[in-house]
Image: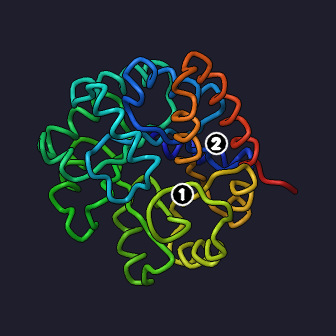
C-alpha cells in the first residue's frame, strides 16, 4: 500500500476528505520554503502539492506565476529542489505530489528525473502541459521508478476521455473546479457537483478538486460533492506573497490557515 492509498483509506475511515495545500518550491527562498511546507503539515495537511517553478506556467494565474518567478530568482535548480523535498520527507510521511511542466522534467530526462524523485520521496507527478495521450515515455519512466501519475479532468472532458484518464491514473484524479488558470475565486463553480458525479460514475479512484478554492466554505462545498480531497493553492500563495516583509511570522499564519481548511474537510452529519 503506497502513501496515497494509505492516506485516503485512513481519511475514509475518519469520514474526512484530504486537505491538500499547495506552494511553489523555493518561494520565497529555499529555507523559508521548507518552513512553509512544515507549517502546512503542522496545520493538518494530509497531502502536499508542490509546484516546480517554471518561467512560463501556462496553467497558473498571476499569483502562482509570481511565486515561480521568486523561486527562480532565489536560485532553485534540480539539485536544490530534490534536496528540499528530502528535507520535507524527513519531517513527515505525508504523500508529496509535484506539479510541473514538460520542459522542467525533459531537461533532466524522464528516467533521470523520476529516479531522483523516487529517491527524494516524491509520490506522484502531474505534468500540467502534457496530455495523457502523449505521455507514454513519461509513464514508462514513472512506472519503472514507482512514481504515481496524476492527470486533469474538467467539466468539458468527455466520458470516453475520463475513462481513459482514470485508467492511466494511479494516485488520484485532479478535477479542476472551473475552466481557465489557477487563482483565487469568490464563488465555487456550480458545475462541480455534476462533474464529480460524472467522474464517479466511471471510476472509484480518489478525486481531488482544485482551482479557485479559497475559503473553508469552498472546501466544505467540495466535500459535500463526494470528492476525496480539496486542493488549495492561490489563496495560500497569496498569503505568502502578502507577508514577504514579515516573513518570520508567516509559518504561524499559514499553520492556522491550513488548520481552518482542514477543519472544513470533515464530513458533517
Q: Where the C terminus falls, by quadrant?
A: bottom right
Counting from the top left corner in percent of width and height, residue 54 is at: 28, 44
Image x and y of residue 53, in percent: 31, 40
> Circle 1 — which element?
strand
Give the CA distance from mark 1 to mark 2.
21 Å
Label 2 belongs to which residue?
Answer: 10
Q: Which residue is drawn at 27% across and 52% down?
A: 56
Residue at position x 44%, y 69% in the image: 153
User: Counting residues from the N terminus, which is met first, the one under dot 1 or under dot 2?
Assistant: 2
- Neighbor class of circle 1 (other Cα within 10 Å; few <14, some 14-19, many 20+) is many
Q: In this view, does 194 lie above or below 41?
A: below
The residue tagged 1 is: 210
Q: Cβ–Cβ below 8 Å for labels 1 and 2?
A: no
Q: What residue lies at 49% left-to-right and 44% top-to-bottom?
A: 4
Residue 175, compared with residue 264, is above or below; it is below
Mark 2: few/some/many CA within 10 Å (<14, 14-19, 20+): some
Position of residue 61 in the picture relative to residue 239 (left or right) = left
Q: How many labels does the image show?
A: 2
Q: In this view, does 88 lie to the left or right of 221?
A: left
Reply above or below: 183 against 32.
Answer: below
Residue 144 image offset from top left, x and y in percent: 20, 45
Who's the residue at 46% across and 81% down the image?
Answer: 156
Amino acid at each position: 500500500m503506497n502513501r496515497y492509498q494509505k492516506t485516503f483509506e485512513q481519511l475514509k475511515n475518519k469520514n474526512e476528505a484530504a486537505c491538500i495545500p499547495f506552494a511553489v518550491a523555493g518561494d520565497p527562498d529555499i529555507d523559508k520554503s521548507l518552513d512553509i511546507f512544515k507549517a502546512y503539515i503542522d496545520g493538518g495537511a494530509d497531502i502536499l502539492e508542490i509546484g516546480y517553478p517554471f518561467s512560463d506556467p501556462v496553467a497558473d494565474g498571476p499569483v502562482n506565476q509570481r511565486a515561480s518567478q521568486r523561486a527562480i530568482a532565489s536560485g532553485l535548480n534540480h539539485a536544490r529542489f530534490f534536496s528540499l523535498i528530502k528535507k520535507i520527507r524527513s519531517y513527515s510521511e505525508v504523500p508529496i505530489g509535484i506539479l510541473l511542466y514538460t520542459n522542467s522534467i525533459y531537461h533532466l530526462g524522464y528516467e533521470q528525473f523520476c529516479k531522483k524523485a523516487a529517491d527524494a520521496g516524491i509520490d506522484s507527478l502531474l505534468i500540467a502541459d502534457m496530455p495523457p495521450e502523449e505521455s507514454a515515455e513519461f509513464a514508462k519512466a514513472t512506472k519503472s521508478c514507482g512514481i504515481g501519475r496524476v492527470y486533469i479532468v474538467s467539466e468539458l472532458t468527455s466520458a470516453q476521455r475520463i475513462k481513459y484518464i482514470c485508467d492511466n491514473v494511479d494516485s488520484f484524479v485532479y478535477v479542476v473546479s472551473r475552466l481557465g488558470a489557477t487563482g483565487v475565486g469568490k464563488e465555487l463553480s456550480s458545475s462541480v457537483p455534476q462533474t464529480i458525479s460524472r467522474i464517479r460514475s466511471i471510476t472509484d479512484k480518489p478525486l481531488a478538486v482544485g482551482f479557485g478554492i479559497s475559503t473553508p466554505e469552498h472546501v466544505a462545498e467540495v466535500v459535500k460533492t463526494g470528492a476525496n480531497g480539496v486542493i488549495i493553492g492561490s489563496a495560500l500563495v497569496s498569503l505568502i506573497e502578502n507577508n514577504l516583509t514579515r516573513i518570520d511570522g508567516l509559518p504561524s499564519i499559514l499553520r492556522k490557515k491550513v488548520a481552518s481548511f482542514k477543519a472544513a474537510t470533515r464530513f458533517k452529519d
